[in-house]
Amino acid sequence: MSAAHYDSYTEARAHLKDLLDAAERGRVATIRRDSATAALVDVDRMRHFLASIIPSRAEVVSEAGGWSVFIPGLPVAVDGSSFDEAIMEMVDALREYAEDWQERLLDAPNHRDNWGLVQLISFSDDQQLRDWLVGAAR
């Protein structure tokens, strides 16, 4: 099987299994609708790729018997009494940010370029996000 490309929604619907099979195998799978083309991508492959190209840039600071975590350029900062608690609080804060981005921030000039980060957050479970934040192996 080579790339799976369909020039209409109707054609793609009739070949949905072929599209899904192609995406699962890592092959190109696209659907054209009017002047736009959408790609169908396996989530695990996409998450792995995004995690490899998007650095977390999380900064962790020990202060006053607790820990603070923030990511420069994002409106998220958290505190926790332990390192692990602060990191898990940041996981929650990132999930809230991704939800806000989906609902209202995606077109805001200072947030629209965070598309890849939002996808990474959405495709990751809590442990994967934790590992990404602290720079653990993917």
Image (spheres, rainbow, N blue to C red):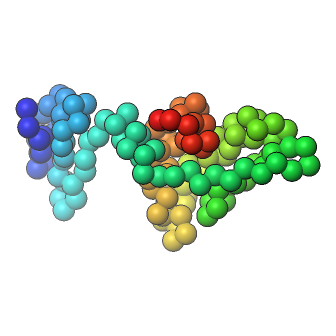
Place of residue 20 in the rendered image (x, y in percent of width and height, measured from the top left): 22, 31
Residue 89 position in % (x across, y down): 72, 40
Task: Looking at this view, name the residue that lies furthest to the bottom.
Answer: 109
Quadrant housing the N terminus: top left
Q: Nearer the viewer, residue 115 or 63?
A: 63
Q: Which one is in front, 28 or 11?
A: 28
**Pick the front one: 110 or 72:** 72
Looking at the image, residue 24 lies above or below residue 51 = above
Q: Tell me if residue 31 can be seen.
A: yes
In the image, what residue occupies the spot 42% across and 51% down?
53
Q: Is residue 76 left or right of residue 17?
A: right
Q: Residue at x 82, y 48 (%)?
A: 62
Task: Describe residue 18's horizontal placement relative to residue 57 as left or right.
Answer: left
Position of residue 68 relative to residue 109, above or below, is above
Please determine whether, in this image, residue 110 is positioned above or below residue 64: below
Residue 30: image x %, image y %?
19, 46
- Residue at point 61%, 64% (across, down): 73
Residue 29: % across, % down:
19, 42
What residue is at 52 percent from the left and 43 percent from the top?
121
Res. 47 image quadrant: top left
Question: As rendered, which of 9 and 32 lies closer to the eye?
Answer: 32
Q: Which residue is situated farthest in the left direction here? A: 1
Question: In the image, 100: left or right of 17?
Answer: right
Q: Tally the marks.
A: 0
Res 10 seen here = no
